[in-house]
Image (cartoon, grey):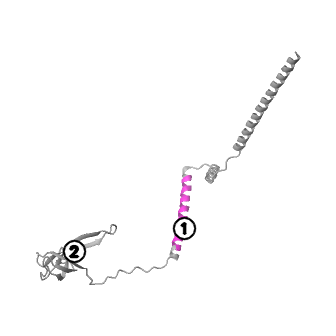
Amino acid sequence: MAETENNENENVEEVEAAEAEATGEAEAAEAAEGAEAEATEEAAAEPAPLTPAQERALARHKEASSRPPRSPAERQAERDARRKAKAAARRRRRLQEREKARANRTEVPPTPPVQRDKGVQKVRQGVVVSAKPDKTITVRIDVARRHRRYEKIVRSSVTLHAHDENNDAGEGDVVRVVESRPLSRTKRWRLDEVLERAR
């Protein structure tokens, strides 16, 4: 019997110890929650630092709320006064910039006109392809030049009409023609010399 009572006492002590531990844990959890709640309240009490834009907006709001209410006409008059002041400031700044630019500017002489030698005409050499009209020959000028990108030789030809006063040149002749004043609707060249006769 005595052993049973001892066992019961031990069991009771164990249960009480377990309850005490559970109570201690609960109190610790409550203390932790309380500390978190206090930290949250402190954070709420201390606002987060404002950005410069938020500070400017807050200052504008305080200024606007401190002014007495105004009628729409008064607000429009204030806007007009602000616009006039800004326009005057812009005018002053632009005048200062112009004066500064004028002071810094160095006199640059005007560009002289391009000097062209008078009486220097273009000269071309080609083959007569037609001498049928009176005092007129048709000359084919062959051009061969290297392509800028692909560097292949590109051949092309141009035909022009030239004045032949004496009907000297015949078909197949190699001739030299010189630029001249307009002689007709299509003639802007004249025969200078027959270099090689056709066979």
Amino acid on which the number 1 mark rests in the picture? Arg
Residue position marked by numbered label 2 in the rendering: 141
Q: In the orientation shown, which residue stands out farthest toward the top?
A: 1
Displayed quadrant of residue 116: bottom left
Residue at 72% across, 42% down: 39
As drawn, is 15 to the left or to the right of 77? right
Relative depth, front residue between 12 and 2: 2
As drawn, is 163 to the left or to the right of 28? left
Disc 2 secondary structure class: strand
Residue at 55% across, 62% down: 86
Q: Are marks 2 and 1 in contact (CB under 8 Å)?
A: no
As drawn, is 169 to the left or to the right of 97? left
Residue position marked by numbered label 1 in the rendering: 93
Give the extent of the magenta segment.
Answer: 74-100
Disc 1 secondary structure class: helix
Which image quadrant: the C terminus? Answer: bottom left
Q: CA distance from mark 2 to mark 1?
A: 64 Å
Locate residue 96, reporting x and y percent.
54, 71
Locate residue 79, reporting x and y percent.
55, 56
Q: In the orientation shown, which residue stands out farthest toward the right?
A: 2
Rendered position, 98 above or below 190 = above
